[in-house]
Image (cartoon, coloured by chain):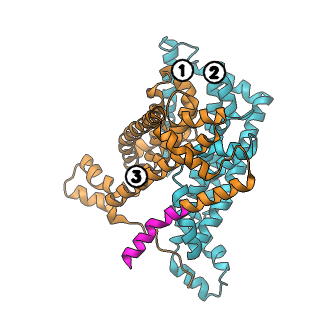
């Protein structure tokens, strides 16, 4: 029975995908609009994109920029967030600055950064870095703040230094929250990746997508949407798997449905 | 938390912003950055005040705010309703859950070309994009808040004679309010970001359009103004939401 349920849990997202595609197909047939191809047409256009060497290089370049930006952002943001959570001084130093930066769309900085650093990889990676770091900082901050004082006291009583306490008590205790932040960061990384490439039309998945839109190749537009969507879903599923492994001990009671009976 | 610590905190917090502006000024005045690429802060702020007083810029702000509010409101209504219902009824949950799992990690900006083709270049496509992007944080946190409501609260309400359909509104919704408001806050920031991006992609007005026009004509000063404006808007809206939150949650223990 457990195996059956696990199988079901694995199959339902696939079913949902099929359902959404079916709704799309039905809507496209009903609307019968030139600029809205059917799902089947869009899927048929995918192999020609993935088979094209240029397009493949472009998409890989996008993924590489995203991976670099994401990794650097996580590496910088987690220590900063943890420090902010444990020290009032650091928190009140950085908080207002971060609050000012948070609602600025990072990809909108692209035109300015392009003036300084050119249209190459550096500016795009920098923009992705900026986009990812804020949610990660905030969640690490919240996670570190919520660590139970008693655990820190016990740690101190057992002779751990401040740095050791941060590494061995605060970091693991805040990990579930940090990973939530990383997940938000991952989605934001994809968004910034696409938009930065749309603004600096030079290479990447966003470039293919919006060039196709400008040229009116609607099959390619929708095929690219499927590809980018699949990228998002795939990365999210991968991350979820890593997360489940890292914080197996703190499985939140998210799955318990609320019953009224 | 007495008055003095608040003032010290405030001063401490203003320090990095002041440092940033000072560094910016230094870069310009020591000639490390040409003025065409990095205008001095004084010039940017005077230009900003000038712009804020001009009626065309005010109309751009109004257009942006209109899209932001409509999209965000749609997201709040849909997110809270779907989240609550999904937490309360397991058949709905079985349908909603896989769909959300598929749609939530999808980068919505990639959907924007499709929305453009379907809804046109006017307000509708931008509002739809904002709503789609802000929906999921609100929906997920509502669902989370509603499904972690203490069962005892529900039993007590039922024992006190609350009708079955009243439970959602009278018990679950208030109990999930802190979580819902956290979701709204994330949704609001995302709305700010997305409305700007959508306007940058295609638009004839709005703050994003102002930025793109400035970028095309290499007016560095005018590029900074909309960015600072959206940052200020975000701060003001965030503050308003914070006020609403502390008003709505006045009976709750500090979270």
Name the residue furthest right: B55
Q: Which residue is mark 2?
A: B221
Q: Colour of chain A?
A: orange
Report the predominant secondary structure element of the magenta stretch. helix
Q: Which mark is residue A152?
A: none
Discs 1 and 2 carry the same chain letter: no
Magenta extent: A1-16
Q: Is residue A208 visible?
A: yes
Q: Nearer the viewer, mark 3 or mark 1?
A: 1
User: Residue at horizontal 67%, vertical 46%?
Assistant: B115
User: Residue at horizontal 40%, vertical 36%?
Assistant: A64
Establish if B197 lies above or below A38.
Answer: above
Among the chains pictured, the one given cyan colouring is B
State which chain disc 2 sits on. Answer: B
SS at mark 1 in the image: helix
Q: Which mark is residue A178?
A: 3
Name the residue furthest left: A159
- The residues bearing labels 1 and 2 have C-alpha atoms spaced at a distance of 13 Å
Percent coordinates x, y for residue B87 in the rendering: 56, 71
Choose the circle earlier in sequence order: 3 or 1: 1
Establish if A142 lies above or below B96.
Answer: above
Which residue is at the front of the view, A81 or A69? Answer: A69
Q: Residues within 10 Å of mark 2 (few under 14, many from 20)?
A: many
Q: Which residue is mark 1?
A: A115
Percent coordinates x, y for residue B20 in the rendering: 49, 27
């Amino acid at each position: 029975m457990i195996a059956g349920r696990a199988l079901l849990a694995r199959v339902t997202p696939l079913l949902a995908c099929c359902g959404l595609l079916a709704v799309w197909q039905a809507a496209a047939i009903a609307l019968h609009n030139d600029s809205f191809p059917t799902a089947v047409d869009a899927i048929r256009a995918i192999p020609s994109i993935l088979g094209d060497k240029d397009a493949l290089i472009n998409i890989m370049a996008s993924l590489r920029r995203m991976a670099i930006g994401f990794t650097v952002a996580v590496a910088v943001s987690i220590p900063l967030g943890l420090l902010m959570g444990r020290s009032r001084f650091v928190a009140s130093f950085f908080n207002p600055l971060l609050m000012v930066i948070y609602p600025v769309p990072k990809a909108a900085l692209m035109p300015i950064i392009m003036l300084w650093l050119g249209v190459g990889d550096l500016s795009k990676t920098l923009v992705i870095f900026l986009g990812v770091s804020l949610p990660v900082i905030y969640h690490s901050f919240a996670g570190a703040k919520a660590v139970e004082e008693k655990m820190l006291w016990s740690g101190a009583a057992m002779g751990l230094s401040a740095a050791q306490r941060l590494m061995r008590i605060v970091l693991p205790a805040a990990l579930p929250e940090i990973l939530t932040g990383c997940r938000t960061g991952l989605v934001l990384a994809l968004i910034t990746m696409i938009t930065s490439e749309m603004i600096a039309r030079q290479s990447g998945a966003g470039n293919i997508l919006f060039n196709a839109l400008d040229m009116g190749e609607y099959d390619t537009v929708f095929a690219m949407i499927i590809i980018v969507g699949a990228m998002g879903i795939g990365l999210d599923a991968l991350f979820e798997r890593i997360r489940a492994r890292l914080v197996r001990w703190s499985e939140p009671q998210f799955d318990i449905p609320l019953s009224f009976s | 938390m007495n008055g003095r610590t608040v003032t010290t905190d405030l001063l401490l917090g203003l320090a990095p912003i002041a440092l940033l502006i000072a560094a910016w000024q230094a870069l310009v005045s020591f000639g490390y950055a040409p003025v065409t690429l990095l205008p001095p802060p004084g010039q940017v702020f005077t230009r900003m005040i000038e712009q804020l007083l001009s009626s065309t810029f005010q109309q751009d702000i109004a257009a942006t705010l209109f899209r932001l509010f409509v999209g965000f409101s749609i997201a709040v209504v849909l997110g809270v309703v779907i989240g609550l219902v999904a937490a309360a009824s397991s058949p709905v949950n079985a349908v909603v859950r896989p769909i959300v799992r598929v749609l939530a990690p999808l980068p919505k900006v990639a959907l924007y070309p499709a929305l453009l083709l379907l809804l046109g270049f006017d307000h509708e496509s931008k509002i739809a994009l904002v709503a789609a992007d802000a929906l999921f944080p609100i929906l997920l946190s509502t669902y989370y808040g509603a499904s972690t409501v203490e069962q005892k609260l529900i039993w007590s309400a039922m024992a006190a004679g609350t009708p079955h359909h009243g439970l959602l509104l009278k018990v679950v919704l208030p109990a999930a309010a802190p979580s819902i408001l956290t979701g709204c806050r994330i949704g609001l920031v995302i709305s700010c970001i997305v409305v700007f991006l959508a306007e940058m992609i295609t638009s004839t007005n709005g703050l994003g359009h102002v930025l793109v026009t400035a970028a095309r004509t290499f007016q560095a000063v005018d590029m900074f103004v909309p960015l600072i404006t959206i940052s200020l808007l975000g701060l003001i809206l965030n503050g308003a939401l914070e006020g609403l939150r502390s008003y709505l949650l006045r009976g709750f223990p500090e979270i």
